Amino acid sequence: MAHARERRDRVVVVTGASAGVGRAVARAFGAQGAKVALLARTREGLEEAAREIQRSGGEALVLPVDVADAAAVGAAADAVVDRWGRIDVWVNDAMVSVFAPVKETSPEEYRRVTEVDYLGYVHGTLAALRHMLPRDRGHVIQIGSALVYRSIPLQSAYCASKAAIRGFTDSLRCELHHDQSRVKVSMVQLPAVNTPQFEVVRSRMPNAPQPVPPIYQPEVIARAVLHVADHPVRELWVGWSTVKAIVGQFFIPGLLDRYLGRVGYRSQQRPIRVRGPRRDNVDAPLPGDKGAHGDFDARSRGRSSQLWLRTHRAWIAGAALAAALTGVAGWRALRA
Protein backbone atom coordinates (compact mmCIF):
# COMPACT_ATOMS: atom_id res chain seq x y z
CA MET A 1 0.00 0.00 0.00
CA ALA A 2 1.29 3.46 -0.91
CA HIS A 3 1.83 5.92 1.93
CA ALA A 4 1.05 9.64 1.81
CA ARG A 5 4.60 10.60 0.89
CA GLU A 6 4.72 8.04 -1.93
CA ARG A 7 1.43 9.39 -3.28
CA ARG A 8 2.81 12.93 -3.30
CA ASP A 9 5.92 11.76 -5.16
CA ARG A 10 4.01 9.86 -7.84
CA VAL A 11 4.38 10.74 -11.49
CA VAL A 12 1.08 9.94 -13.21
CA VAL A 13 0.02 10.12 -16.86
CA VAL A 14 -3.70 10.23 -17.70
CA THR A 15 -5.01 10.04 -21.27
CA GLY A 16 -8.40 11.52 -22.00
CA ALA A 17 -7.68 13.92 -19.15
CA SER A 18 -9.57 16.91 -20.53
CA ALA A 19 -13.06 15.66 -19.63
CA GLY A 20 -15.17 12.97 -18.01
CA VAL A 21 -13.59 10.08 -16.15
CA GLY A 22 -10.07 11.07 -17.20
CA ARG A 23 -10.60 14.56 -15.83
CA ALA A 24 -11.89 13.23 -12.50
CA VAL A 25 -9.01 10.73 -12.23
CA ALA A 26 -6.39 13.37 -12.99
CA ARG A 27 -7.94 15.73 -10.46
CA ALA A 28 -7.98 12.99 -7.78
CA PHE A 29 -4.30 12.19 -8.24
CA GLY A 30 -3.53 15.91 -8.18
CA ALA A 31 -5.39 16.30 -4.89
CA GLN A 32 -2.97 13.76 -3.40
CA GLY A 33 -0.10 16.03 -4.46
CA ALA A 34 1.02 13.93 -7.42
CA LYS A 35 2.71 15.18 -10.56
CA VAL A 36 0.14 14.62 -13.30
CA ALA A 37 0.70 14.71 -17.05
CA LEU A 38 -2.52 15.45 -18.91
CA LEU A 39 -2.99 14.01 -22.41
CA ALA A 40 -5.97 14.73 -24.68
CA ARG A 41 -6.82 16.71 -27.82
CA THR A 42 -8.69 19.65 -26.27
CA ARG A 43 -6.23 22.22 -24.95
CA GLU A 44 -8.85 24.30 -23.12
CA GLY A 45 -9.96 21.31 -21.05
CA LEU A 46 -6.37 20.29 -20.33
CA GLU A 47 -5.39 23.76 -19.19
CA GLU A 48 -8.36 24.03 -16.83
CA ALA A 49 -7.59 20.54 -15.48
CA ALA A 50 -4.02 21.71 -14.87
CA ARG A 51 -5.29 24.73 -12.92
CA GLU A 52 -7.49 22.48 -10.78
CA ILE A 53 -4.55 20.23 -9.99
CA GLN A 54 -2.28 23.13 -9.14
CA ARG A 55 -4.91 24.66 -6.84
CA SER A 56 -5.17 21.36 -4.96
CA GLY A 57 -1.42 21.13 -4.39
CA GLY A 58 -0.27 18.93 -7.27
CA GLU A 59 1.82 19.66 -10.33
CA ALA A 60 0.53 19.40 -13.89
CA LEU A 61 1.96 19.11 -17.38
CA VAL A 62 -0.33 19.81 -20.35
CA LEU A 63 0.41 17.67 -23.43
CA PRO A 64 -2.17 18.05 -26.22
CA VAL A 65 -2.07 14.82 -28.21
CA ASP A 66 -4.30 12.49 -30.23
CA VAL A 67 -3.69 9.03 -28.78
CA ALA A 68 -4.30 7.52 -32.23
CA ASP A 69 -0.87 8.94 -33.15
CA ALA A 70 1.67 6.49 -31.71
CA ALA A 71 4.65 8.76 -32.30
CA ALA A 72 2.93 11.67 -30.55
CA VAL A 73 2.07 9.51 -27.53
CA GLY A 74 5.68 8.29 -27.36
CA ALA A 75 6.95 11.86 -27.53
CA ALA A 76 4.55 12.85 -24.73
CA ALA A 77 5.92 10.04 -22.54
CA ASP A 78 9.45 11.27 -23.23
CA ALA A 79 8.41 14.79 -22.25
CA VAL A 80 7.07 13.49 -18.91
CA VAL A 81 10.33 11.68 -18.17
CA ASP A 82 12.36 14.72 -19.24
CA ARG A 83 10.33 16.84 -16.80
CA TRP A 84 10.00 14.51 -13.80
CA GLY A 85 12.46 11.68 -14.37
CA ARG A 86 10.10 8.70 -14.55
CA ILE A 87 6.51 7.45 -14.95
CA ASP A 88 4.98 5.61 -11.99
CA VAL A 89 1.36 5.23 -13.10
CA TRP A 90 -0.10 5.44 -16.59
CA VAL A 91 -3.92 5.56 -16.87
CA ASN A 92 -5.40 4.90 -20.32
CA ASP A 93 -8.86 6.44 -20.67
CA ALA A 94 -9.20 8.36 -23.98
CA MET A 95 -12.22 7.41 -26.08
CA VAL A 96 -14.67 8.42 -28.80
CA SER A 97 -17.87 6.65 -29.81
CA VAL A 98 -20.59 6.34 -32.41
CA PHE A 99 -24.19 5.59 -31.42
CA ALA A 100 -25.73 3.83 -34.42
CA PRO A 101 -26.80 0.37 -35.56
CA VAL A 102 -24.09 -1.68 -37.28
CA LYS A 103 -25.84 -1.30 -40.65
CA GLU A 104 -25.60 2.50 -40.33
CA THR A 105 -21.98 2.69 -39.15
CA SER A 106 -19.35 3.31 -41.82
CA PRO A 107 -16.00 1.50 -42.19
CA GLU A 108 -14.28 4.84 -41.58
CA GLU A 109 -16.10 5.23 -38.27
CA TYR A 110 -15.12 1.73 -37.17
CA ARG A 111 -11.53 2.54 -38.09
CA ARG A 112 -11.48 5.83 -36.20
CA VAL A 113 -13.06 4.44 -33.01
CA THR A 114 -10.62 1.51 -33.11
CA GLU A 115 -7.66 3.85 -33.57
CA VAL A 116 -8.61 5.92 -30.52
CA ASP A 117 -10.30 3.47 -28.17
CA TYR A 118 -8.16 0.38 -28.77
CA LEU A 119 -4.93 1.46 -30.44
CA GLY A 120 -4.82 4.53 -28.21
CA TYR A 121 -4.54 2.17 -25.24
CA VAL A 122 -1.90 0.12 -27.07
CA HIS A 123 0.10 3.25 -27.86
CA GLY A 124 -0.16 4.48 -24.27
CA THR A 125 0.82 1.11 -22.84
CA LEU A 126 3.81 0.76 -25.17
CA ALA A 127 4.98 4.28 -24.30
CA ALA A 128 4.65 3.53 -20.59
CA LEU A 129 6.44 0.18 -20.84
CA ARG A 130 9.36 1.74 -22.69
CA HIS A 131 10.10 3.74 -19.55
CA MET A 132 8.84 1.32 -16.89
CA LEU A 133 10.51 -1.92 -17.97
CA PRO A 134 14.12 -0.68 -17.64
CA ARG A 135 13.29 0.45 -14.06
CA ASP A 136 11.34 -2.78 -13.41
CA ARG A 137 8.68 -0.61 -11.75
CA GLY A 138 5.42 1.01 -12.76
CA HIS A 139 1.71 0.43 -13.08
CA VAL A 140 -0.52 0.66 -16.17
CA ILE A 141 -4.23 1.05 -15.40
CA GLN A 142 -6.68 0.44 -18.24
CA ILE A 143 -10.09 2.07 -17.85
CA GLY A 144 -12.52 -0.54 -19.12
CA SER A 145 -16.23 -1.11 -18.87
CA ALA A 146 -18.83 -3.78 -18.27
CA LEU A 147 -19.03 -3.62 -22.07
CA VAL A 148 -15.60 -5.26 -22.16
CA TYR A 149 -17.50 -8.48 -21.47
CA ARG A 150 -21.11 -7.75 -22.48
CA SER A 151 -21.76 -5.77 -25.67
CA ILE A 152 -24.92 -3.75 -26.13
CA PRO A 153 -26.74 -2.51 -29.24
CA LEU A 154 -25.90 0.82 -30.91
CA GLN A 155 -22.29 0.88 -29.66
CA SER A 156 -20.65 -1.91 -31.67
CA ALA A 157 -17.46 0.02 -32.45
CA TYR A 158 -16.95 1.04 -28.83
CA CYS A 159 -17.79 -2.41 -27.42
CA ALA A 160 -15.46 -4.14 -29.88
CA SER A 161 -12.62 -1.80 -28.98
CA LYS A 162 -13.15 -2.36 -25.27
CA ALA A 163 -13.12 -6.14 -25.75
CA ALA A 164 -9.89 -5.80 -27.73
CA ILE A 165 -8.30 -3.89 -24.86
CA ARG A 166 -9.03 -6.80 -22.52
CA GLY A 167 -7.47 -9.29 -24.97
CA PHE A 168 -4.37 -7.13 -25.37
CA THR A 169 -4.05 -6.60 -21.62
CA ASP A 170 -4.42 -10.30 -20.81
CA SER A 171 -1.62 -11.15 -23.25
CA LEU A 172 0.60 -8.48 -21.76
CA ARG A 173 0.07 -9.80 -18.23
CA CYS A 174 1.19 -13.27 -19.31
CA GLU A 175 4.35 -11.85 -20.83
CA LEU A 176 5.16 -9.79 -17.75
CA HIS A 177 4.80 -12.92 -15.62
CA HIS A 178 7.07 -14.81 -18.03
CA ASP A 179 9.70 -12.09 -17.74
CA GLN A 180 9.28 -11.94 -13.95
CA SER A 181 8.70 -8.21 -14.31
CA ARG A 182 7.50 -6.12 -11.39
CA VAL A 183 5.57 -3.82 -13.73
CA LYS A 184 1.86 -4.16 -12.96
CA VAL A 185 -1.20 -3.98 -15.21
CA SER A 186 -4.79 -3.54 -13.98
CA MET A 187 -8.21 -3.04 -15.53
CA VAL A 188 -11.05 -1.10 -13.91
CA GLN A 189 -14.43 -2.12 -15.36
CA LEU A 190 -16.99 0.68 -15.18
CA PRO A 191 -20.77 1.06 -15.02
CA ALA A 192 -22.58 3.89 -16.79
CA VAL A 193 -20.99 7.21 -15.82
CA ASN A 194 -22.23 10.80 -15.96
CA THR A 195 -19.69 12.32 -18.34
CA PRO A 196 -19.83 14.81 -21.24
CA GLN A 197 -19.37 11.86 -23.63
CA PHE A 198 -23.08 11.92 -24.39
CA GLU A 199 -22.91 15.56 -25.49
CA VAL A 200 -20.10 14.94 -27.99
CA VAL A 201 -20.72 11.37 -29.21
CA ARG A 202 -21.69 10.89 -32.84
CA SER A 203 -25.28 9.66 -32.90
CA ARG A 204 -27.77 8.65 -35.57
CA MET A 205 -30.54 7.98 -33.08
CA PRO A 206 -33.72 10.07 -33.19
CA ASN A 207 -33.44 11.07 -29.52
CA ALA A 208 -30.55 12.45 -27.46
CA PRO A 209 -28.20 9.72 -26.15
CA GLN A 210 -27.80 8.86 -22.49
CA PRO A 211 -25.91 6.34 -20.31
CA VAL A 212 -27.87 3.23 -19.35
CA PRO A 213 -29.07 3.67 -15.74
CA PRO A 214 -27.98 3.29 -13.01
CA ILE A 215 -25.55 6.15 -13.57
CA TYR A 216 -22.55 6.96 -11.37
CA GLN A 217 -20.60 10.18 -10.94
CA PRO A 218 -17.04 10.20 -12.34
CA GLU A 219 -15.63 10.77 -8.85
CA VAL A 220 -16.76 7.23 -7.94
CA ILE A 221 -14.49 5.95 -10.70
CA ALA A 222 -11.66 8.22 -9.61
CA ARG A 223 -11.79 6.72 -6.11
CA ALA A 224 -11.66 3.24 -7.62
CA VAL A 225 -8.59 4.14 -9.69
CA LEU A 226 -6.82 5.62 -6.66
CA HIS A 227 -7.53 2.40 -4.77
CA VAL A 228 -6.07 0.29 -7.59
CA ALA A 229 -3.00 2.52 -7.73
CA ASP A 230 -2.49 1.88 -3.99
CA HIS A 231 -3.56 -1.79 -4.06
CA PRO A 232 -2.73 -3.26 -7.48
CA VAL A 233 -5.21 -5.93 -8.57
CA ARG A 234 -5.83 -7.73 -11.83
CA GLU A 235 -9.33 -6.27 -12.24
CA LEU A 236 -11.69 -4.12 -10.23
CA TRP A 237 -15.39 -4.08 -11.08
CA VAL A 238 -17.28 -0.92 -10.09
CA GLY A 239 -21.01 -1.00 -9.31
CA TRP A 240 -23.56 -3.78 -8.96
CA SER A 241 -24.71 -3.16 -12.54
CA THR A 242 -21.22 -4.01 -13.77
CA VAL A 243 -21.15 -7.18 -11.68
CA LYS A 244 -24.56 -8.26 -12.99
CA ALA A 245 -23.64 -7.59 -16.62
CA ILE A 246 -20.35 -9.49 -16.45
CA VAL A 247 -21.67 -12.44 -14.46
CA GLY A 248 -24.80 -12.57 -16.61
CA GLN A 249 -22.67 -12.81 -19.74
CA PHE A 250 -20.94 -15.87 -18.29
CA PHE A 251 -24.19 -17.71 -17.58
CA ILE A 252 -27.03 -16.40 -19.79
CA PRO A 253 -25.52 -14.68 -22.86
CA GLY A 254 -28.34 -15.69 -25.21
CA LEU A 255 -31.01 -14.43 -22.85
CA LEU A 256 -29.12 -11.12 -22.54
CA ASP A 257 -28.97 -10.85 -26.35
CA ARG A 258 -32.76 -10.99 -26.53
CA TYR A 259 -33.28 -8.75 -23.49
CA LEU A 260 -30.94 -6.04 -24.79
CA GLY A 261 -32.47 -6.29 -28.24
CA ARG A 262 -35.78 -5.44 -26.63
CA VAL A 263 -34.74 -2.67 -24.20
CA GLY A 264 -31.26 -1.54 -25.32
CA TYR A 265 -32.41 1.06 -27.85
CA ARG A 266 -34.84 2.80 -25.50
CA SER A 267 -32.52 2.73 -22.46
CA GLN A 268 -29.78 4.60 -24.34
CA GLN A 269 -31.99 7.51 -25.43
CA ARG A 270 -33.53 10.38 -23.52
CA PRO A 271 -37.10 11.44 -24.29
CA ILE A 272 -35.70 14.49 -26.05
CA ARG A 273 -35.95 14.65 -29.84
CA VAL A 274 -32.80 15.66 -31.73
CA ARG A 275 -33.52 18.53 -34.09
CA GLY A 276 -30.85 19.50 -36.56
CA PRO A 277 -27.28 18.20 -36.90
CA ARG A 278 -25.22 17.38 -33.78
CA ARG A 279 -21.57 18.32 -33.44
CA ASP A 280 -19.30 15.47 -32.32
CA ASN A 281 -15.65 14.92 -31.42
CA VAL A 282 -14.99 11.68 -33.32
CA ASP A 283 -12.65 13.11 -35.95
CA ALA A 284 -11.62 16.36 -34.29
CA PRO A 285 -11.90 17.87 -30.80
CA LEU A 286 -14.63 20.34 -29.99
CA PRO A 287 -13.54 23.66 -28.49
CA GLY A 288 -14.09 24.60 -24.88
CA ASP A 289 -13.85 22.97 -21.49
CA LYS A 290 -16.43 20.21 -20.93
CA GLY A 291 -15.39 19.34 -17.36
CA ALA A 292 -15.87 15.99 -15.67
CA HIS A 293 -19.68 15.86 -15.40
CA GLY A 294 -22.36 15.44 -18.03
CA ASP A 295 -26.01 16.46 -17.91
CA PHE A 296 -27.16 13.73 -15.52
CA ASP A 297 -26.18 15.00 -12.07
CA ALA A 298 -29.73 14.73 -10.74
CA ARG A 299 -29.88 11.05 -11.70
CA SER A 300 -26.35 10.02 -10.75
CA ARG A 301 -25.02 8.23 -7.70
CA GLY A 302 -22.07 9.62 -5.78
CA ARG A 303 -21.25 6.32 -4.07
CA SER A 304 -21.23 2.59 -4.80
CA SER A 305 -21.93 0.10 -2.00
CA GLN A 306 -20.38 -2.65 -4.15
CA LEU A 307 -17.15 -0.67 -4.52
CA TRP A 308 -17.04 0.04 -0.78
CA LEU A 309 -17.44 -3.66 0.03
CA ARG A 310 -14.84 -4.62 -2.58
CA THR A 311 -12.26 -2.11 -1.38
CA HIS A 312 -12.80 -2.83 2.33
CA ARG A 313 -12.64 -6.62 2.18
CA ALA A 314 -9.72 -6.85 4.58
CA TRP A 315 -11.47 -4.58 7.12
CA ILE A 316 -14.73 -6.54 6.79
CA ALA A 317 -12.93 -9.88 7.16
CA GLY A 318 -11.10 -8.58 10.24
CA ALA A 319 -14.32 -7.32 11.80
CA ALA A 320 -16.04 -10.64 11.10
CA LEU A 321 -13.15 -12.55 12.63
CA ALA A 322 -13.14 -10.31 15.70
CA ALA A 323 -16.90 -10.79 16.11
CA ALA A 324 -16.51 -14.55 15.79
CA LEU A 325 -13.69 -14.66 18.35
CA THR A 326 -15.72 -12.49 20.73
CA GLY A 327 -18.66 -14.83 20.34
CA VAL A 328 -16.50 -17.88 21.01
CA ALA A 329 -14.97 -16.23 24.07
CA GLY A 330 -18.42 -15.36 25.38
CA TRP A 331 -19.69 -18.89 24.82
CA ARG A 332 -16.71 -20.33 26.68
CA ALA A 333 -17.27 -17.89 29.56
CA LEU A 334 -20.89 -19.01 29.83
CA ARG A 335 -19.82 -22.65 29.97
CA ALA A 336 -17.12 -22.02 32.56
Image (cartoon, grey):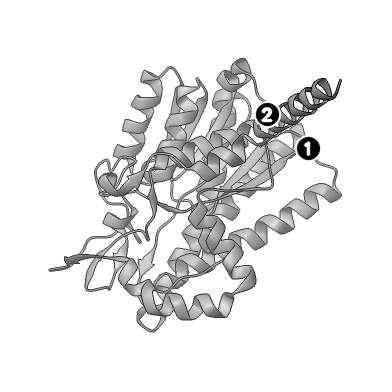
Residue at screen point 51% across, 63% down: 147
Where is the N terminus found, in terms of image quarters? Answer: top right
> Seen from this angle, which residue lies furthest bottom?
103
Pointer 2: what residue? 319
For mark 1, give the secondary structure: loop
Task: Point out residue 243 in the picture as x, y percentages from the top left corner.
Answer: 56, 56
Is tag 2's residue or tag 1's residue first in the polypeptide sequence?
A: 1
For mark 2, give the secondary structure: helix
Residue kind at label 1, given as amino acid type: Arg
Question: Image check: 172 left or right of 101?
Answer: right
Question: Image check: 256 left or right of 40?
Answer: right
Give residue 77's quadrant in the image.
top right
Pointer 1: what residue? 182
Q: Where 323 falls versus 308 (above or below)?
A: above
Question: Image check: 331 left or right of 86?
Answer: right
Q: Where 48 falls versus 43 (above or below)?
A: above
Task: Point out residue 230 in the picture as x, y percentages from the top left corner.
Answer: 63, 30
Comparing marks 2 and 1, which lies closer to the viewer?
2
Give residue 82's quadrant in the image.
top right
Question: Image check: 143 left or right of 172?
Answer: left
Residue kind at label 2, given as amino acid type: Ala
- Residue 88 appears anywhere in the view: no
